């Protein structure tokens, strides 16, 4: 592995993630990799595959040349994989991630619980 390239990719990814106000978990989920893998990528410990690099560019709204250190940070149009708004608070993004992992029955129960709690708050 080219250590210098891994560090360059990691630093660019970290800067783009911060610019978008995303957590590592947000990016990892949207790219479709484990959060631990994404964390190692940001620290320059691992290089992404070409497929992962492409998805990373879409999620981070970044040109591949910029991510590879070949050009300045050129933003690109948001890709279809951006599922939540970057301005959402981290707690809300974590909640959405947790809800996505639920099965239909569990999700229905959570929805009922939330509606009940909101009804109590409105009294």
Image (tube, helix red, strand yellow):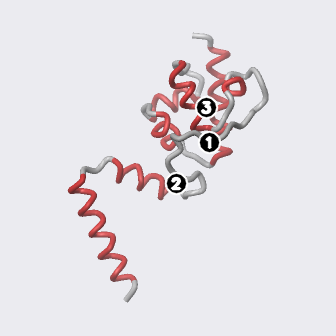
Give me the residue at 69% from left, 30% from top.
63
Q: Which residue is mark 2?
A: 90
Q: Which quadrant of the view contains residue 77?
A: top right
**Can residue 123 be spotted in the picture?**
yes
Marks 2 and 1 sit apart, C-alpha to C-alpha, by 20 Å
Give me the residue at 32% from left, 47% from top.
101
What mark, if any, has residue 78 been given in the picture?
1
Give me the residue at 62% from left, 11% from top.
2
Q: Residue furthest right?
A: 72
Q: Which quadrant of the view contains residue 76?
A: top right
- Give the answer, above or below, for where 70 lies relative to 21: above
Residue 80 location (% of width, % of height): 53, 41
Viewer-nearest of discs 2 and 1: 1
- Give the answer, above or below, for where 64 lies relative to 100: above
Marks 2 and 3 sit apart, C-alpha to C-alpha, by 21 Å
Marks 1 and 3 sit apart, C-alpha to C-alpha, by 9 Å
Residue 65 location (% of width, % of height): 71, 23
């Amino acid at each position: 592995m080219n250590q210098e390239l891994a560090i360059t990719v990691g630093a660019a990814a970290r800067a783009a993630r911060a610019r978008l106000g995303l957590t590592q978990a947000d990016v990892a989920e949207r790219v479709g990799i484990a959060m631990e893998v994404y964390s190692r990528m940001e620290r320059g410990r691992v290089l992404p595959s070409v497929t992962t690099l492409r998805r990373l560019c879409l999620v981070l709204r970044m040109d591949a040349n910029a991510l590879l250190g070949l050009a300045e940070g050129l933003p690109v149009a948001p890709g279809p994989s951006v599922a939540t708004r970057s301005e959402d608070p981290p707690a809300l993004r974590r909640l959405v991630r947790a809800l996505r992992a639920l099965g239909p029955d569990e999700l229905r129960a959570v929805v009922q619980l939330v509606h009940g709690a909101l009804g109590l708050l409105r009294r």
